[in-house]
Amino acid sequence: MAGGRVPRPGPGPGPVGAAAEFHDELARIRRTPGDTARTDLEIAHRGPLPAPLLRADLPERIADLLEWVWREAVAPDWPRRRRVIEADVVARARQLSRLGWAAALDGMHPEMRWLGSNRLQINTRAFPPRQLIGAQLLFVPVTARRGWISTDRPDSLGAVHRNAVVYPCSGTLAEQERTVAPEALAKLLGAGRASVLMLLDSPMSTTHLVTVTGQGLGPVGRHFKVLLDTGLVGRRRSGRSVLYYRTPVGDGLVRAQDS
């Protein structure tokens, strides 16, 4: 994961309000002094900047570029990206509650490790250790394939210093994979219901499953009801969505197909 002193995402209410928060972040970038922006980019770039970036209006040009990328590449697909992010957040929370910090953090990036004794290894680069006592550490899922480390200077004297680990979402929904149910499981539950159970390795909503499986909203809803009634899945609210996930019983049934 790359490291550097680049603006970390703001601690807003979550993905649902991302568009408004994004424009707030653009305003912060535009207010950044040019010298500060160049210094921060040199740290992230790990060396001198190319000549075209040595300009006084660098923060304004960066903000304009980010705004264009949001408008042209991200905003049209934002509902799907938001569902991926929500599913990852619920999956991480479930992993944390069941298996602890080590399991929840180790899967974020190959180089990240919970070392115990209040120590977290972010990556294997030779940065000096950093004390975060009195600071905030945010974990920010993104739909990109790579993550990075983000830090922020306090806006005023005595303000809380914030750091962020930005990591790529994982799971079936993030990777857009179609999972084929084993034949024995399909015979037991029915092909459609079995495929839904297989896909719930990462939490999904009814809408998620309709998109991934191609099944209609009615059939997917009926599959969820049966799976809930039999204790094979559970559900949890995340923002405005209700996400479904496999219970330990459901996990055991799926794992049994591999034995």
Image (cartoon, rainbow, N blue to C red):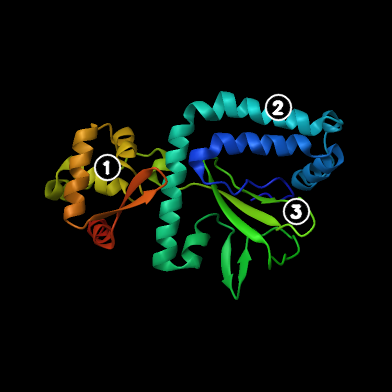
- Amino acid type shown at disc 1: Val
Please name which of the two marks, 2 or 3, marks the residue nearer to the observer.
3
Residue visible at 16% across and 56% down in the picture: 230
Give the residue pinned by disc 1.
180
Question: Viewer-proximal residue, 235 or 120?
Answer: 235
The mark nearer the N terminus, 2 or 3, is 2
The mark nearer the N terminus, 3 or 1, is 3
Residue 202 visible, this orientation: no
Residue visible at 59% across and 29% down in the picture: 70
Disc 1 element: loop
Q: CA distance from mark 2 to mark 3?
A: 24 Å
Residue 234 visible, this orientation: yes
- Amino acid type shown at disc 2: Asp
Along the horizontal axis of the image, is 108 left or right of 69? left
Residue visible at 73% across and 32% down in the picture: 62
Query: Which image quarter: residue 131?
Result: bottom right
Give the number of the disc on residue 54: none
Vertically, is 15 above or below 120?
A: above
* Residue 123, image x, y percentages: 64, 58
Circles 1, 2 touching at the beta carbon (< 8 Å): no
Give the residue pinned by disc 2.
64
Disc 2 element: helix
Along the horizontal axis of the image, is 116 left or right of 57? left
